[in-house]
Image (cartoon, rainbow, N blue to C red):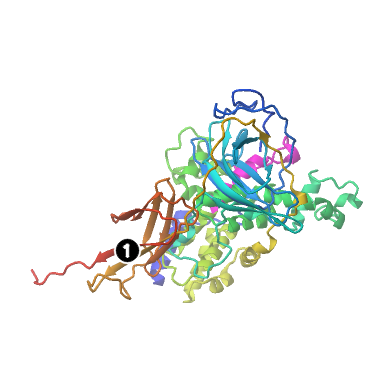
């Protein structure tokens, strides 16, 4: 076993190049006032011609990034996707309301609006979050629109308002959307989370990532760059070294510190969904590396942006992600049809430099000296880099990872991200030379890159405590825009919301004794199972003990579902019911053996 692993390690060494040093520390545009007819905004957004608007100025607002209860929707497009959410406040409020938000997958997206109905009353929101006050329990139907042509999926939601002592309780009873997620690293390793950890959960809504952490480096940067005014604090709110906030400075910066650390959560949620990286891992990484200030630093090498990525980190990503390589390469060379590794070393350095520049949010002409749109867009690059390190870990271990548990493999990935592939590979070789299993307990002692063991252990401590810092602000902290109410025209029927609570239980087995039923020892593990719906949703799992269970909560009853084993020509289709368990069994027969020798 060790010989096979060693061969894979040396093969990877040749692939990466001999002598690569350790890697340290890698890592809502407000629309103008609505004017006249048809349904056209000054920002250039044209909505369905059946709607008309009155000219009502909206108050300017600042999003605070607070956690609310709600649901997302999304839609794809050639130039990006558009997402819309309905959210309900947490706890008692003095006047019942919900908030609507929308964002595009492109950080520099132009103006976005939400148009829809609450019961039979039409409304338009041009700034977010958009606060709609309610008189009673209500039904919602709405979409988001951008002036570049994107349209989100339609959101249908049912909202309850209950009067209680001291105020009102508002809750989202049902919505018609559900976002599926596949942990790409777990699928790559073929190892699942056996401990049911909370830190790798996929949250359904970006605001469920909102945190309220005291971040001293972030507070210092907010003060130094003029984001927060601390002129009335002694010494300007900073210590003598200008690298730490005083108590007065920290108090002045506290509100903006919360807003700043949560402004990237939409991007984190989206990158998590697209790249298959658990979102709490991604946010913890950004917090640990940069405390969410997208500045640059020099420790071992020049490091850039939210993920503190340097050229050695980009080298890993450029080798493994051809699409990203194309993005970086075509910014400096006209023809990038060849692979990254086929360029001369000097040309590779130029490509790495172009890739790192995608992370560089420094912008002297921008407010506070940073380009926040570029910083938000870079979150997806950091998620891709984490995924690339997952892949490198799998390659270094040669697919023989039975010794390592799921958490160990994530620790390996973080060690690779922080200290570099070479540092991790050398530690694996050292463990194998001692004849020990490759577990984190054995490997952490062999890491020679600076602070490698402390970085990973500290990261996991932060990750395990993530939920202790979730942000639940009071009603007084809500700062939101108001919608424009459209004069009543033809009444619109109140939408009826139906969601499923069904499960699909898939069993895969090899009928060794040919009795037609699954018996002990006949289960087929790690078999990929795909569930595809008629509205273009896809969920993928691997079987454990021969079984894969798909929770279809939130999906619309009546959609057509196809369950299949990719590449094996086995599938079964049915209509999704409102509730209950649907059993799907795929049986493989033992091959017939000849009775006579030839």
The residue singled out by tag 1 in the image is 585
Q: In the rendered view, would you say 191 is above or below 160? A: below
Q: In the rendered view, would you say 593 is above or below 386? A: below
Which quadrant of the structure image shows residue 208? Answer: bottom right
* Location of residue 468 in the rendering, given as x and y in whole percent from the top left corner: 68, 64
Instruction: Check residue 403 for magenta coloring.
Output: no
Instruction: Check residue 374 for magenta coloring.
Output: yes
Return the residue nearer the eye: 401 or 483.
Answer: 483
- Residue 338 appears left or right of 81: left
The residue drawn where x is 46% and y is 57% is 552
Dot 1 alpha-carbon crowd within 10 angstroms: few under 14, some 14 to 19, many 20 or more: some
* Location of residue 78 in the rendering, given as x and y in whole percent from the top left corner: 48, 35
Q: Is residue 318 visible?
A: yes
Q: In the rendered view, would you say 476 is above or below 597? A: above
**Segment colored magenta:** 358-385
The residue drawn where x is 66% and y is 45% is 99
Give the residue furthest to the top: 37
> How many discs mark residues in the rendered view?
1
Magenta stretch prevailing secondary structure: helix
Return the residue nearer the eye: 58 or 324.
Answer: 58
The N terminus is located in which quarter? Answer: bottom left
- Residue 561 appears left or right of 181: left
In what element is the residue under mark 1? strand
Q: Is residue 359 visible?
A: no
Which quadrant of the structure image shows residue 598? Answer: bottom left
């Amino acid at each position: 076993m060790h010989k096979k692993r060693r061969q894979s390690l040396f093969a990877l060494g040749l692939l990466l190049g001999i002598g690569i040093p350790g890697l340290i520390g890698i890592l809502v545009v407000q629309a103008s006032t609505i004017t006249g007819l048809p349904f056209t905004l000054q920002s250039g957004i044209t909505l369905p011609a059946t709607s008309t608007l009155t000219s009502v100025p909206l108050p300017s607002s600042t999003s605070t990034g607070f956690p609310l209860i709600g649901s997302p929707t999304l839609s794809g497009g050639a130039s990006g996707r558009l997402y819309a959410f309905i959210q309900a406040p947490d706890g008692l409020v003095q006047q019942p309301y919900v908030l609507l938000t929308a964002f595009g997958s492109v950080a520099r997206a132009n103006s976005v609006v939400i148009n829809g109905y609450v019961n039979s009353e039409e409304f338009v929101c041009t700034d977010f979050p958009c606060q709609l006050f309610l008189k009673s329990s209500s039904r919602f139907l709405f979409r988001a629109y951008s002036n570049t042509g994107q349209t989100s999926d339609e959101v249908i939601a049912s909202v309850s308002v209950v009067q209680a002592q001291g105020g009102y309780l508002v809750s989202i009873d049902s919505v018609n959307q559900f976002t599926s997620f596949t942990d790409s690293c777990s699928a790559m390793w073929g190892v699942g989370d056996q401990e049911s950890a909370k830190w790798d959960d996929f949250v359904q809504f970006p605001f469920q990532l909102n945190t309220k952490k005291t971040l001293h480096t972030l507070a210092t940067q907010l003060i130094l760059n003029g984001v927060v005014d601390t002129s009335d604090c002694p010494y300007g709110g900073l210590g003598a070294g200008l690298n730490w906030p005083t108590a007065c400075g920290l108090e002045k910066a506290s509100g903006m510190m919360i807003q700043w650390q949560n402004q990237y959560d939409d991007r984190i949620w989206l990158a998590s969904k697209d790249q298959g990286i658990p979102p709490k891992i991604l946010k913890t990484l950004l917090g640990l590396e940069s405390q969410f200030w997208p500045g640059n630093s020099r420790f071992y090498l020049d490091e850039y942006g939210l993920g503190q990525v340097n050229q050695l980190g980009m080298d890993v990503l450029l080798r493994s992600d051809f699409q990203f390589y194309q993005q970086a390469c075509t910014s400096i060379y006209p023809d990038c049809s060849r692979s990254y590794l086929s360029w001369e070393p000097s040309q590779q350095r130029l490509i790495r430099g172009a890739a790192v520049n995608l992370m560089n949010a420094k912008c002297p002409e921008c407010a506070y000296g940073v380009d926040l749109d570029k910083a938000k867009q870079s979150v997806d690059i950091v998620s891709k880099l984490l995924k690339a390190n997952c892949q490198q870990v799998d390659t270094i271990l040669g697919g023989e990872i039975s010794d390592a548990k799921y958490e160990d493999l994530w620790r390996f990935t973080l060690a690779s991200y922080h200290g570099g592939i070479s540092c991790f590979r050398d530690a694996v070789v050292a463990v194998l030379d001692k004849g020990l299993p490759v577990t984190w307990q054995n490997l952490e002692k062999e890491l020679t890159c600076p602070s490698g063991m402390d970085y990973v252990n500290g990261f996991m401590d932060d990750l395990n405590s993530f939920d202790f810092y979730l942000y639940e602000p009071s009603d007084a902290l809500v700062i939101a825009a108001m919608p424009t109410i459209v004069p009543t025209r033809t009444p619109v029927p109140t939408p009826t919301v139906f969601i499923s609570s069904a499960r699909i239980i898939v069993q895969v087995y090899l009928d060794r004794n040919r009795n037609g039923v699954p018996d002990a020892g006949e289960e087929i593990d790690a078999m990929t199972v795909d569930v595809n719906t008629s509205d273009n949703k896809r969920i993928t799992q691997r079987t454990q003990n021969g079984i894969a269970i798909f929770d279809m909560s939130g999906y619309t009853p009546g959609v057509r579902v196809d369950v299949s084993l990719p590449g094996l020509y086995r599938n079964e289709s049915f209509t999704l019911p409102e509730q209950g368990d649907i059993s799907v069994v795929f049986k493989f027969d033992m091959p017939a053996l000849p009775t006579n020798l030839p």
